[in-house]
């Protein structure tokens, strides 16, 4: 199940995330992404392997869909 409505606080966090993340994903922002994805996609917090970045790109797209809502 997916929570479809993002809180205002999480929207502010996501705006900051998008403004500060480009080609690389600093650890502090990786934690933010993992926390938001776990919360909105209702799964345990996990930090996937960052060896190719594919999962993180998919997760960013997932959160973008909720943010754009």
Image (tube, rainbow, N blue to C red):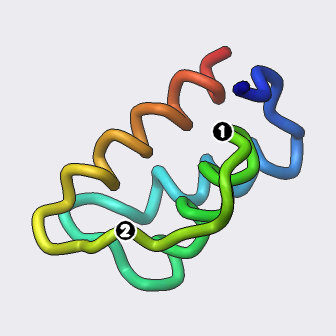
Would residue 65 appear left or right of 1 to someone viewing this image? left
The residue most toward the right is 8
Q: Residues within 10 Å of mark 1 (few under 14, many from 20)?
A: some
User: Disc 2 or 1, which lies upstream in sequence?
Assistant: 1
Marking on residue 48: 2
Q: Residues within 10 Å of mark 2 (few under 14, many from 20)?
A: few
Please report the residue visible at 56 percent of the width from the left and 63 percent of the height from the top: 34
Circle 2/circle 1 CB separation < 8 Å: no
Q: Quadrant of residue 4?
A: top right
| Percent of width and height locating residue 43 | 67, 51
| Percent of width and height locating residue 14 | 62, 49
| Dot 1: element | loop
Please report the residue visible at 37 percent of the width from the left and 80 percent of the height from the top: 26
For the residues labelled 2 and 1, the Cα–Cα distance comes to 15 Å
Marking on residue 15: none
The residue most toward the left is 52
Q: Quadrant of the N terminus?
A: top right
Q: Quadrant of the C terminus?
A: top right
| Dot 2: element | loop
Please report the residue visible at 71 percent of the width from the left and 26 percent of the height from the top: 2
Would residue 3 appear left or right of 14 to someone viewing this image? right
Marking on residue 41: 1
Depth check: give the residue in front, 36 or 43: 43
The residue most toward the bottom is 27
The vertical placement of 49 against 54, above or below, is below
| Percent of width and height locating residue 25 | 32, 71
Please report the residue visible at 11 percent of the width from the left and 64 percent of the height from the top: 52
Would residue 30 appear left or right of 13 to someone viewing this image? left
The vertical placement of 4 against 39, above or below, is above
The vertical placement of 28 against 24, above or below, is below
């Amino acid at each position: 199940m997916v929570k479809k409505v993002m809180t205002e606080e999480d929207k502010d966090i996501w705006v900051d995330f998008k403004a500060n993340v480009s080609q690389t994903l600093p650890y502090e922002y990786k934690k933010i992404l993992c926390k938001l994805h776990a919360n909105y996609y209702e799964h345990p917090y996990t930090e996937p392997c960052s060896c190719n970045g594919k999962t993180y790109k998919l997760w960013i797209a997932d959160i973008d869909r909720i943010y754009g809502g």
